[in-house]
Amino acid sequence: MTLPRLPLEDQVAIVTGASRGIGRAIALALSEAGARVVVNYQHNINGAAEVAGLISGRGGAALTHGADVCVPDEVQQMVDAAMNRWGRIDILVNNAGVTRDAPFARMQEQQWHDVIEIDLTSAFVCVQAVLPVLEQRRYGRIVNVSSLAGLAGNVGQVNYAAAKAGLIALTKNLARELAPRGITVNAVAPGYIETDMIEQVPDRQLQWALNAIPLGRFGSPEEVGSAVRFLTLPEASYITGHTLVVDGGWVMP
Ligand code: NAP
């Protein structure tokens, strides 16, 4: 008896910032659909190894790779490592991101530059490195992890909101430029998701958000992981330039 093929079988995905949180859930979701996954991390080598271990424990294939997504040479080495191991790349998920929150009047220039670099410029760097590989086979799925802040703004996050809005514009622009080459480019915009990132948000702000979310709870990393996975599946082949909001109905843009 032959088992049914998984939808992403044989495909190779790079997921940036996959050592924990949403990136970890994306890596696991893509692997469940059959993809071989490069689990990128910056500092958390143990977290990345755990994700790779979970994937291989379920019969999948994973490769951990430490790279700062803002540094072109490091990103190129990650792409080369994937090509050396598996000879192809089909999916890039630009997930790595940070916050450096402060009210606008007190925000330091360094906080601004760090977030623009890590949350926005990194996507430019990663797409530049992966694009020649995707173009060879005239196929690719790029998913950028933006944020509700990029659509609606958020007090204390002018740097983050600007970076995430930039990521949505980058998504639309690349969708237009890369469509003739068989590459779709989409974004997801999560609301508050239960990861390390929201531990820095003050309790009263979280409570205010909770009251405003129609579904009455924060999201899980897995709920973002399945939205990202959907955008990589054959079922999503006619969707490009889209931003899929995953926010429990909070903003309804
Ligand atoms: P998280 O738990 O803080 O994890 C961040 C991940 O990004 C880690 O794996 C970290 O790697 C990686 N990373 C940070 N800087 C990096 C760099 N320069 N190079 C490579 N990797 C780097 O965050 P999260 O909540 O999962 O967020 C993931 C994405 O979702 C981010 O883009 C975030 O903006 C977005 N998002 C999150 C929420 C939320 O409520 N949590 C809402 C909307 C959007 P190491 O740990 O190895 O250093």
Image (cartoon, rainbow, N blue to C red):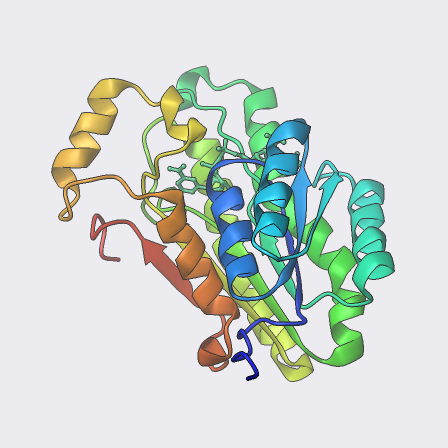
Tell me: residue 197, above or below residue 135. above
Residue beneath the point at 83% across and 60% down: 83
Which x, y percent locates residue 62? 68, 51
The correct choice, above or below, for 87 with respect to 99 in the image is below
Quadrant in which the N terminus is drawn:
bottom right
Coordinates of residue 134 in the picture (x, y in percent): 73, 71
Q: Is residue 138 visible?
A: yes
Q: Residue furthest top?
A: 106
Q: Is residue 60 left or right of residue 145?
A: right
**Count of numbered circles on the image:** 0
Pick the residue in front: 72 or 88. 88
Q: Residue at x 37, y 28 (%)?
A: 198
Q: Quadrant of residue 64?
A: top right
Residue 97: x percent and y percent? 55, 37
Q: In x, y percent, where is residue 27?
A: 55, 51
Q: Is residue 244 left or right of residue 124?
A: left
- Tell which of 60 and 222 is nearer to you: 60
Q: Is residue 121 visible?
A: no
User: Is 28 situated left or right of 253 in this image?
Assistant: right
Which residue is drawn at the image coordinates 20% and 20% (left, top)?
Answer: 204
Q: Nearer the viewer, residue 33 or 78?
A: 33
Tell me the residue at 57%/44% (across/down): 54
- Please tell me whether residue 234 is drawn above or below residue 193 in the rendered image: below
Task: Tell me the quadrant of the picture where the C terminus can be found.
Answer: bottom left
* Image height of 115 relative to 135, above or below: above
